[in-house]
Image (spheres, rainbow, N blue to C red):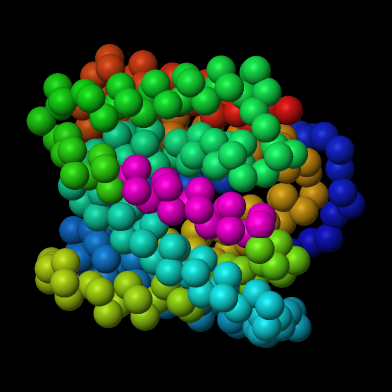
Amino acid sequence: MAVMERKSYIDTFGAVALVLFALNLAFNQVVVKVTNGGFGPVFLAGLRSVGGAVVLLVWMKARGVSFTLPRSSITAGVISGALFAIEFMCLFTALDLTTVGRVSIIFYSMPVWLALSAHVLLPAERLSRLRSVGLVLAMGGVVLALLDRSNGQASLLGDLLALCGAFCWAAIAMLVRVTPLSRVPPEQQLLWQLIISAPLLVLAAPLFGDLLRDVQPIHLWGLAFQIIAVASFGFLAWFWLMSIYPASSVASFSFLSPVFSVILGWLLLGEHVGWTIWVALALVAAGIFLINRK
């Protein structure tokens, strides 16, 4: 990717790129739900990790980036890969059971759990009054979404799996911050998450039902989209943006992903979105925005 100088603020290019990235992640939730029609969800997650690892290996080889983790980071790398496998096992299964809107509201509450764990584990990252308000708002939104049973498409198991996925995502982020992984290039972190999760997901997939369902061309296109636009180049684009713009400013755009996801699920899949879910979405989005403010 092109080298750009470090900036102290989000310029127009950065704002557009971050909005598009949030939209990409939101659209991927719809893609996963549709692609689950052709593959078992856990097997699909495994195939995505395999494909993403291959693409990333080729990209890193072409750019001369080392594949090898420092010895001090191997244990944390393996743990992050295992958590990555559980995260997407939960997320893809959740999307198979319940709506994109519900899953996204709950799954993208990750900054809430990361901020809460950082408050406890990292003395330098105690919650300010403003961030505490954001925490309460977002947690209220998640609870409201979990309690809402008005939609016939809702699944309590799906909701809880989405929450488990959010916990695993936050655990990975915390692991990177408190272990030697913090000194490892992002490409190596992602590679290890993919190469550890790929066999775990593929081997676990038969325990969760049929590997293949009614595979159609749209499902193959969906898998390709996840491999290229999300699991490899999508995450690399995120790391690239983080290397240019202030981390807190980049993170403040994360509230857009659940907003876009609910809207796309409603527009593209015809999902029913009751007033409770809209309120839950507003609470979570506002909470995430405040949590990421310094």
278 or 3, nearer to the observer? 278
Classify the position of the N terminus by image quarter.
bottom right
Q: Position of residue 102 (x, y in %)?
A: 29, 34
The residue under the point 31% across, 34% down is 101
Q: Give percent across and percent down for residue 151.
A: 15, 27
Residue 124, given in percent of the width and then of the height, sits at 74, 39
* Residue at 49% over, 39% down: 113
Residue 93 lies in what quarter of the image?
bottom left
Residue 187 falls in image quadrant: bottom right
Q: Is 246 located above or below residue 141 in the figure? A: below
Q: Which residue is at a point 15% across and 25% down the rendered structure image? A: 149
Magenta segment includes 279: no
Helix, strand or loop for the magenta stretch, by majority:
helix
Going by the picture, which residue comes out furthest to the right?
5
Question: Which segment did they paint magenta?
Answer: 162-178
Above or below 233: residue 13: above
Of the 4 image quadrants, the one containing the C terminus is: top right
The foreground one among 172 and 248 is 172
Reply above or below: 256 against 54: above
Residue 11 falls left or right of residue 260: right
- The residue at 54%/36% (across/down) is 116
Residue 14 visible? The answer is no
Q: Is residue 230 visible?
A: yes
Q: How many marks?
A: 0
Q: Quick check: 237 left or right of 169?
A: right
Q: Quadrant of residue 47?
A: bottom left
